[in-house]
Amino acid sequence: MSSNNLTRGERLQIMLTLEEVEALDNWRFTRRMPSRAAAVRELLKRGLAAEGFSVADSGVKSQEFGVTSAAADGADGLDRT
């Protein structure tokens, strides 16, 4: 099925920090992606295909998952053991 024939019946809303939006836009523009939505779909595809991801600890809140700084400082709520 070509991507032009896809029907997207679900809407997903996410809140991002200004730093996260800037990181997304920089990634998108570098790769000449046509829209933020296309960039997010491509990143999701790559993330889901990646190996070695960790499962979140129980009780971790959504706000504890960051895109730009949380992984760098180890405060992303993921069990990496």
Image (cartoon, helix red, strand yellow):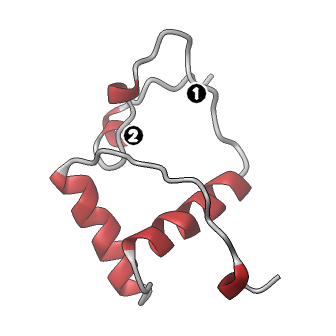
Give the label on residue 71, or none: 2
Which amino acid is tagged 2? Ala
Work out whether residue 7 can be spotted.
yes
Instruction: Name the residue at 58% across, 58% down.
Output: 44
Residue 38 percent coordinates (x, y): 49, 74
Q: In which quadrant will I find the C terminus? A: top right
User: Disc 1 on helix, strand or loop?
Assistant: loop
User: Disc 2 on helix, strand or loop?
Assistant: helix
Give the label on residue 80, or none: 1
Horizontal side of residue 70 vs 38, given as left or right: left
Out of 1 and 60, give the one closest to the viewer.
Answer: 1
Q: In which quadrant will I find the N terminus? A: bottom right
Instruction: Name the residue at 41% across, 90% down.
Output: 32
Using the rendered view, name the quadrant where residue 80 is placed.
top right
Horizontal side of residue 54 vs 2, given as left or right: left
Out of 76 and 35, give the one closest to the viewer.
Answer: 35
Marked residue nearer the N-terminal end (2 or 1): 2
Instruction: Name the residue at 32% across, 28% down.
Output: 63
Residue 4 percent coordinates (x, y): 66, 87
